[in-house]
Amino acid sequence: MTIPFWRRWLSGAGVGGAYEAAFSQSPHGMLVVDGRSLAVRDANPALQASLGYKLRELRKMPLAQIFSDDGGPPEALLAQLRQSPEMLLIETGQRCRSGRFLYVEVSGYRLDVGNRCLYALTTRDITMRRRMEAQLLEKQQHLDHLAHHDQLTGLPNRLFLAAHLPGAIEEAKRSGSMLAVLFLDLDRFKHINDSRGHETGDKLLKAVAQRIRTTTRTDDIVVRMGGDEFIVVLKTVATPEQINETASRITEALAAPVLIDGRPLVTTASIGVSLFPRDGSNMGELLRQSDTAMYQAKDRGRNNYQLFSPVMERKLKERIAIESSLRAALQGRQLDVHYQPIVDIESHRVVALETLLRWRHPSLGFIPPDRFVAVAEETGLIVPIGEFVLERAIEDAARWRAAGSMTVPVSVNISAVQLQRSDLPATIARLTRMHGVSPNMLQLELTESAVFERRESRNGESAQDAIARLRELGTRIAIDDFGTGYSSLSYLKKWRVDYLKIDRSFVRDLVTDMSDLAIVEAIIAMAKHLNIEVVAEGIEGWQQLEKLRQLGCPYAQGFLLARPAPFDLCRRYLTGQPLDLTVQHPSGYQLDATGS
Ligand code: C2E
Ligand code: MG
Ligand code: MG
């Protein structure tokens, strides 16, 4: 074996022994290459062993065959060597004869041996470290994915949105395009969760997530914010129509029933939309405005979408104010009830009194129930409020009787939420017993949706079971606002409803609108056939009253006959005599007419 010249030179210099030993005994691989040609001149035993090549083989191999950057030539290493550095430190790979690939750290320095230039390279195996780094990175990426994605649906989550929406807004700003934020909230999801169980709720959320994802473009962001709330960010919006298209596509996709455990489940969504730059310039503003618009969509009967407008913001503030003061109202004696007579159309005698909730807010003044009942339902406050109304009605009935007034049943409006979340039959049994009033002096007005939506209450009882128990007590059941919901005739028959109240909207134009006339006529005929009583709501004019009388409608309610009045003024309704319709009502009642 020829002794490399540099070792010979070292021996000549009298220091060869020590260096030779350092070279041949180093645990790290060492390599000497020619400064100009980069050809291998020498390699120590450690390097030969790790590569699996003998020195004579290595001498014939170009550096690019020994070292490699993940399969390719070690460009960085070669570049640094060509620039003839004084000192070199680089990470690259080493290809062994066995086919094994090792990660190595190569450090090197320039050797001037006589008039020749050489490089001395030392290699250190860093495969282990690299592997650990790779594992760590993978773990980090996995954790990162977990932190930024929702486990149930696999969709990105709120954190992801916070990380990506600002960038998308910046991008839209730069390119001068619009960006839309769609805030989507499932309708009545809570009811599904409560009645069908969380497992079903989870499956529904998964199906919904998938449907939203398939209706959007791949570069749109779809996020589950939590619960039943989703956000869709449309990144480049060219025209507002594009938003309408996407929102309709989502609404349509959700409308098809979802089969869960073999049972079809229908869900809808309310969607609020805010637009960059029109409605806000940053993430916070855009999210807030889309949320506001979503509430508006809920208010407009759910299952629709609304674009944000500043009017909505005002309404939302008002709603929040109502929510926070409603609780105080219940405790602070701001709530009261008024009574409006239900009258026999032929005799003009009062046959019942409908209990109507009233709220006198200390600073906002009179707030009509249409404005706060929905808020009370959402917050669950309708349960104690409803109980307050029931107790007042029963208590007042007892007071009228004690005062010797004629007694007629009191009719109380019952919200679907109340029917579902409280044990109404038990409450009524308790209150009537407590005040010594028979339960058959009580009538309950339920809306069509409360009766016919097939939901279960907390204790697993359906609305129909609860109604059956109420009827057993002797309480009569009315369907309120009839015609605005989706009652089917067969249901009316099955649950033996006692009476229907034809909604005001059909009565209003009864005299002039032929189709309203036809509807009212049909309802009266149908009810007669099924042995159900009918009350027409909202009679304001003589012509309406006369028309209803001709159609054979037995009972009526409306401002023409009598306005809602507080307890103290109700005595005049309870004389047992026909109402004198020519008498003008005291002006104080006007409050109820306008709701102002
Ligand atoms: P509703 O049960 O259909 O009650 C009849 C509504 O029509 C009352 O409005 C009454 O004042 C009004 N009204 C009566 N006659 C006429 C008329 O000739 N013309 C017009 N324009 N309106 C007339 P109010 O008191 O504002 O109540 C609105 C709704 O709020 C009620 O509709 C009912 O759904 C709900 N509500 C009222 N009190 C309660 C309650 O104690 N509990 C629940 N859950 N809901 C209630
Ligand atoms: Mg009513
Ligand atoms: Mg009504």
Image: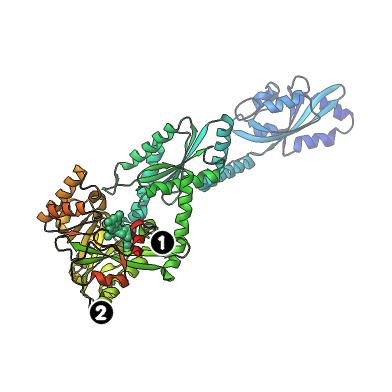
Element type at marker 2?
A: loop
Camera-nearest residue between 354 and 486: 354
Residue on which disc 1 sits: 366
Element type at marker 1?
A: strand
Q: Is residue 4 left or right of residue 589?
A: right
Camera-nearest residue between 3 and 229: 229
In this orientation, does residue 145 appear? no
Q: Amino acid at mark 2?
A: Ala
Question: So how many labels did they put on this image?
Answer: 2
Q: Is residue 427 left or right of residue 3?
A: left
| Residue 101 occupies quadrant | top right
Camera-nearest residue between 162 and 528: 528
The residue sitting at the top extreme is 37
- On the image, the x and y values in percent for residue 296 come to 41, 47
Q: Residues within 10 Å of mark 2 (few under 14, many from 20)?
A: few
| Residue 319 occupies quadrant | bottom left
Q: Residue at x 69, y 33 (%)?
A: 47
The residue sitting at the right extreme is 13
Numbered mark located on residue 403 in the image:
2
Q: Residues within 10 Å of mark 1 (few under 14, many from 20)?
A: some
Give the CA distance from mark 1 to mark 2: 29 Å
Q: Residue at x 87, y 21 (%)?
A: 115
- On the image, the x and y values in percent for residue 477 come to 21, 63
Q: Amino acid at mark 1?
A: Phe
Of callouts 1 and 2, which one flags the residue occurring earlier in the amino acid sequence? Answer: 1
- On the image, the x and y values in percent for residue 40 come to 73, 24
| Residue 471 occupies quadrant | bottom left
Q: Is mark 2 within 8 Å of ligand 1?
A: no
What is the image's colouring? rainbow
Q: Is residue 479 left or right of residue 149?
A: left
